[in-house]
Image (cartoon, helix red, strand yellow):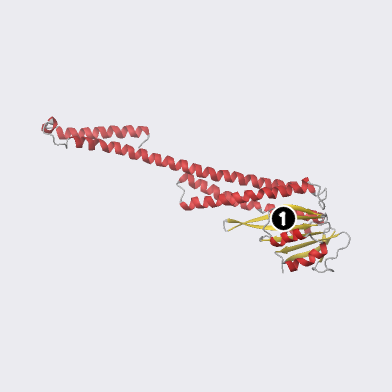
Amino acid sequence: MSIVASYVYRDGKCVRPAPLTPEGLELAKGEFLWIGMHEPSADEFGSLIDCFGLHPLAVEDALSAHQLPKLEVYGDELFVVALTAEWHDDSIVYGETHMFVGSNHIITIRHGSGRGHKPLRDYLEAFPEQMAQGPDRVLYAVLDFIVVGYMPIVDAIEDSVLETEHVALDRFLSRSDATNLFQLRRQLLKFYRLAGPMEDMVKRLYLWDLPVIGPEVRPYFRDVADQVRRVAGRTSALLDIVSSVFDVSSLLEQQRQGVITRKLAAWAAILATPTAIAGIYGMNFRLMPELNWTYGYPAALLLMLAVCAGLFASFKRSGWL
């Protein structure tokens, strides 16, 4: 079954389970219902449609998933889609949580998310004064729970990016290092693009005059929007760092290649001197006075050594060697 939990609350306390039957979903005054589902089928969702009069368009979205974060108003009912994300096997795994929020009920539907709401439900049940505020307070708690889950993702990517940055300063980036950096950049870009609609959706919850959302709960959504903004800011900063790592790596590689080129040029100049002198005296012309000089050979060797030593000292002072 896709129904994870279904309970009725009164004064912030759980009073009974709520099976998805007309009798189980019947509520007294002052009670509200919280139903949690995971990838339900259309048949399992049928009783909720009849009981709460859920809008067909919202139901279609909730069953099909693959939605961007959004907020829609259908009469006195809110339909909220929130993006979920988890860090798993060095990649971001995305999911969605769809929520129907009315005056006496909240229905949460998870798609592709491995983070269940049981810890959140246990926490809220431990503080009845919070749960007593109604479905709008539960909506805030679920959104806060989702957004808090973004932080470990940013932390994990930040650690990986900074580690690669440190590697780039010590040595050439290998093919695997560059590939990993490109993958991180691709994931950061997607995460950043999705954080924008998530922030816009949450901002509407405290900026707009919406049904179901009480004035005492509305300021809490500002805190959730601030958290999404901080995540988006850190993600943007990490994108800049990734770009700078590529730039720094390219500059350092060019610098190292320049050093090698200068060394090769210096040694080529040093070796060219004896080659040139030996080439001159190897031309075998008959009228070359030095060929008949007793000290011609040692003089030529000393000349080669002196010039090579002078060039070596000059290149050493200039930093080419």
Q: Amino acid at mark 1?
A: Val
Q: Visible in this render: residue 116? A: no
Residue for badge 1? 81
Image coordinates of residue 94 in percent, x first then y, are 64, 57
Position of residue 113 measured from the top left corner of the image (x, y, whole percent): 66, 60
Give the image quarter of residue 289.
top left
| Residue 199 visible in the current orientation | yes
From the viewer's perspective, tell me whether residue 96 is left or right of residue 20. left
Q: Is residue 118 left or right of residue 240?
A: right
Q: Dot 1, how many residues are within 10 Å of its Cα: few (below 14), some (14-19), or many (20+)? A: many
Q: What residue is rendered at 67% in x and 54% in y? A: 149
Q: Residue at x 31, y 33 (%)?
A: 313
Look at the picture and state if 228 lies above or below 301: below
The one nearer the camera, 14 or 140, is 140
Q: Residue 284 or 118: which is nearer the viewer?
A: 284
Classify residue 62 as left or right of residue 298.
right
In percent of width and height, residue 267 lies at: 31, 39
The N terminus lies in quadrant: bottom right
182, above or below 46, in the image: above
At a point 20% along the width and 37% down the height, the residue shown is: 279
- Identify the element where label 1 is drawn: strand
